[in-house]
Image: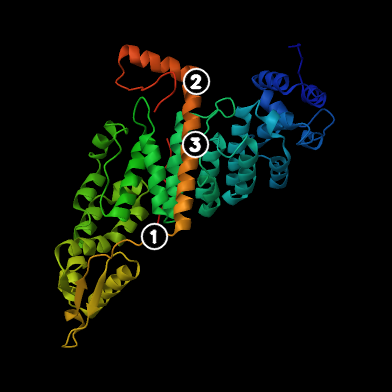
């Protein structure tokens, strides 16, 4: 590689415009910014007072502009318009940009920072979404841009903007493409779970939180413990109880979880509304510090449904007054007209959503509280539509093919093979069926109102 002397912004611009190979350009620009004032020089105007952003074209001079723009956006008072930022993200050439993944990360974070200085996080959503969609070779790659984008969506309260990104299956990680870390992977799934929780799409939230909790690592991360707290609350909403963690999750996580107030909540859920209210008031400071107050409210909001579901396991008939007593916040008022009306609406709503199968029979006395609720066993499941079965089968075949391809690629990975052999020799406790062929600090987000 020929020696290149870059001592000023004019030198940098001349070298960028000369069209050197992207790997050479990335090398020399990295060396330039390592100097004490390298970033400051890139963030300035040239000797003639011209703005370098107006002298270079995003598509033709992508790599040079990437270094200059990321430097300009990280100074104390960025003076670049979002119109220009959007133009760059729409027009840049992805191939040369991949020779400086750390500057792509810096640019993404800088875009979010500038939007924050404008006190309008939504300004960053469009440029970041475009950058995310155009940078990687395919949407299947996890990059550092993902976490930046999800954080911006949360702060801007534009949660639905993140759904298309979160709905894309991620199967590829390339450290040469993006300077991604173990924590980035955890954070992506944690933030994805938070966003789906805010949108009340609890099944998807459960999947993302579980993925965060079960990522293997040397030690348990604080992000994983926070994800487990939210995963547990989501499961209380979905199933009325917490599910056991998969066997491949860290055994240390359940022990840490049992030391938190969430364990008491799980043990006594759904219990009674009065009991829940007392427990929540006692630990309000902890739930608030974790950013889980709104999610806790959702858990409490769903508690009456799970109380009724438990009643159906024991009784075939109950009066509305008895149901009101079981779910009421105040036993003394369980006979009141509002309490009876609340119980009636709850039962009717659960019947409409197929959560229970029951009928309400009016009392012969005309007293609403004496009306009888008769619970019935659910009908046998209906047969699937052939079109639905074909779609499920096609999806299963596609997933199987993808897993087979990933398995073969992993079996050829030198790093994996070296680790597998080492673990087998020294007895790590992990099992590898066929080494040659492959294997058979984040802040809390979310205040959700019922």
Disc tally is 3
Q: Nearer the viewer, mark 3 or mark 1?
A: 3
What SS does tag 1 mark?
loop
Residue 306 sits in quarter: bottom left
Q: Nearer the viewer, residue 48 or 142?
A: 142
What SS does tag 3 mark?
helix
Residue at mark 1 to residue at mark 2: CA–CA distance = 47 Å
Quadrant that contains the N terminus: top right
Task: Give the residue furthest to the bottom.
Answer: 365
Q: Is residue 405 left or right of residue 101?
A: left
Give percent across and percent down for residue 141: 55, 35
Task: Give the numbered dot on residue 449.
Answer: 1
The residue that label 3 is drawn on is: 401
Q: Residue at 42% of width from left, 54% of height from top?
A: 201
Q: Is residue 359 left or right of residue 46?
A: left
Task: Give the numbered dot on residue 74.
Answer: none
Q: Residue at 31% of width from left, 50% of height from top?
A: 235
Vertical comparison of 232 with 275: above or below: above
Comes first in the chain, label 1 or label 2:
2
Q: Nearer the viewer, residue 293 or 317?
A: 317
- Mark 2 nearby-residue class (10 Å; few <14, some 14–19, many ≥20): few
Q: Residue at 72% of width from left, 40% of height from top?
A: 88
Residue at mark 3 to residue at mark 2: CA–CA distance = 19 Å
Vertical comparison of 338 with 433: above or below: below
Task: Give the residue furthest to the right.
Answer: 48
The residue that label 2 is drawn on is: 413
């Amino acid at each position: 590689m020929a020696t290149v002397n870059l001592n000023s912004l004019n030198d940098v611009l001349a070298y960028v415009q000369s069209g050197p190979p992207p790997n050479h350009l990335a090398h020399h620009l990295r060396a330039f910014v390592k100097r004490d004032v390298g970033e400051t020089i890139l963030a300035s105007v040239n000797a003639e007072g011209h703005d370098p952003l107006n002298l270079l074209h995003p598509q033709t001079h992508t790599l040079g502009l990437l270094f200059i723009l990321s430097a300009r956006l990280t100074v104390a008072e960025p003076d670049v318009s979002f119109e220009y930022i959007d133009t760059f993200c729409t027009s840049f050439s992805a191939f040369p940009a991949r020779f400086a993944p750390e500057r792509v990360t810096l640019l993404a974070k800088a875009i979010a920072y500038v939007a924050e200085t404008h006190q309008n996080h939504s300004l960053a959503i469009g440029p970041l979404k475009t950058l995310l969609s155009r940078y990687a070779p395919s949407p299947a790659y996890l990059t550092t841009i993902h976490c930046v984008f999800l954080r911006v969506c949360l702060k801007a309260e534009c949660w639905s903007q993140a759904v298309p990104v979160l709905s894309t299956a991620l199967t590829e990680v390339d450290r040469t493409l993006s300077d991604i870390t173990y924590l980035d992977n955890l954070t992506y799934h944690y933030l994805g779970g938070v966003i789906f929780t805010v949108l009340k799409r609890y099944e998807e939230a459960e999947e993302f939180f579980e993925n965060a909790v079960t990522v293997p690592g040397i030690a348990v991360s604080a992000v994983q413990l926070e994800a487990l707290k939210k995963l547990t609350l989501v499961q209380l909403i979905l199933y009325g109880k917490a599910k056991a963690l998969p066997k491949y999750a860290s055994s240390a996580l359940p022990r840490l979880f049992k030391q938190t107030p969430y364990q008491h909540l799980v043990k006594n859920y759904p219990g009674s509304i009065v009991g829940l209210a007392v427990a929540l008031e006692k630990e309000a400071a902890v739930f608030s510090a974790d950013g889980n107050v709104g999610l806790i409210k959702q858990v409490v909001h769903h508690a009456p449904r799970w109380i009724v579901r438990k009643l159906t396991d024991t009784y075939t008939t109950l009066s509305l007054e008895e149901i009101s007593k079981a779910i009421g916040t105040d036993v003394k008022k369980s006979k009141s007209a509002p309490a009876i009306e609340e119980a009636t609406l709850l039962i009717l709503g659960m019947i409409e959503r197929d959560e229970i199968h029951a009928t309400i029979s009016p009392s012969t006395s005309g007293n609403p509280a004496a009306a009888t609720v008769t619970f019935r066993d659910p009908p046998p499941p209906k047969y699937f539509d052939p079109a639905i079965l074909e779609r499920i089968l096609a999806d299963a075949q596609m997933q199987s093919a993808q897993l087979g391809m990933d398995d073969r690629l992993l079996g050829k990975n030198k790093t994996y093979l070296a680790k597998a052999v080492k673990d087998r020799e020294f007895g790590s406790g992990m099992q590898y069926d066929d080494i040659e062929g492959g294997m058979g600090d984040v802040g809390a987000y979310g205040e959700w109102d019922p």
